[in-house]
Image (cartoon, coloured by chain):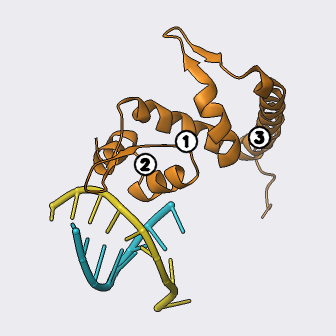
Chain colours: A orange, B yellow, C cyan
Amino acid sequence: MRIGELARRSGVSERALRYYEEQGLLSPNRTPSGYRDFEESHVDTVRRIRSLLAAGLSTAIIAELLPCMVDTGEGLAPGCPELLPHLERERDRITASIDELTTARTLLTKVITTTPPVGAC
DNA sequence: CTTCTCACA
DNA sequence: TGTGAGTA
């Protein structure tokens, strides 16, 4: 499929899709006319890219990780054992990030639901 | 009409 | 990352 279809199906802009390719996250074939030709599997790949990007991983890390995610039909297996230490660090960083967000949410919820004393603000 | 590359009031 | 230009 060409870039337009992948953009519609993944909800990602064509601009971003070209950027992902530039960063080595996607490697579509090219038609003789120069148009990018994406595979069906790229739809899932783009979803993974968005998820990892949203979690704070760099495009460089994602580029290394993607080819190492072996789809076993059951789940994803680590195709590159040497990346595990790094991945565990990322996971811990995400966990810490979640904790901070949870703390902030709790604070905001408290402020939002607490009855203000007369005359406040 | 769609995609491509390149560039930036 | 968006957007517009000028093509193929």
- Residue A39, x across and y down, in percent: 36, 34
List x then y, in percent, for residue A98.
Answer: 76, 35
* Residue ID for mark 1: A50
Q: Left of A52 or right of it: where is A103?
A: right
Residue at 63% across, 41% down: A63
The reply to whether label 2 and label 1 mark residues of one chain is: yes
Q: Position of residue A119 (x, y in %)?
A: 79, 62
Whether label 2 touches label 1, CB < 8 Å? yes
Q: Quadrant of residue B1?
A: bottom left
**Real-space Cα separation, disc 3 to disc 1, in angstroms:** 20 Å
Q: Is residue A56 visible?
A: no
Among the two numbered marks 2 and 3 on one chain, the one whose residue lies closer to the N terminus: 2
**Type of amino acid under label 3:** Leu
Distance of label 2 from label 1 (alpha carbons)? 9 Å
In-image side of A6 versus B8 (left or right): left
Q: Are marks 3 and 1 on the same chain?
A: yes
> Are dots 2 and 3 on a single chain?
yes
**Of marks 2 and 1, which one's residue comes earlier in the chain?**
2
Which chain letter matches label 1?
A
Quarter of the image with the N terminus of chain A is top left
Mark 2 is on which residue type? Val
- Relative to A11, residue A15 above or below: below
For the residue marked with disc 1, what is the amino acid?
A: Arg
Residue at the location (77% across, 46% down)? Answer: A111
Chain at tag 2? A
Residue B9 x/y as whole percent: 46, 91
Work out which residue is located at the far front of the displayed protein and give it. Answer: A32
Q: Which residue is mark 2?
A: A12
Q: Residue at x 82, y 36 (%)?
A: A93
Q: Which residue is mark 3?
A: A101
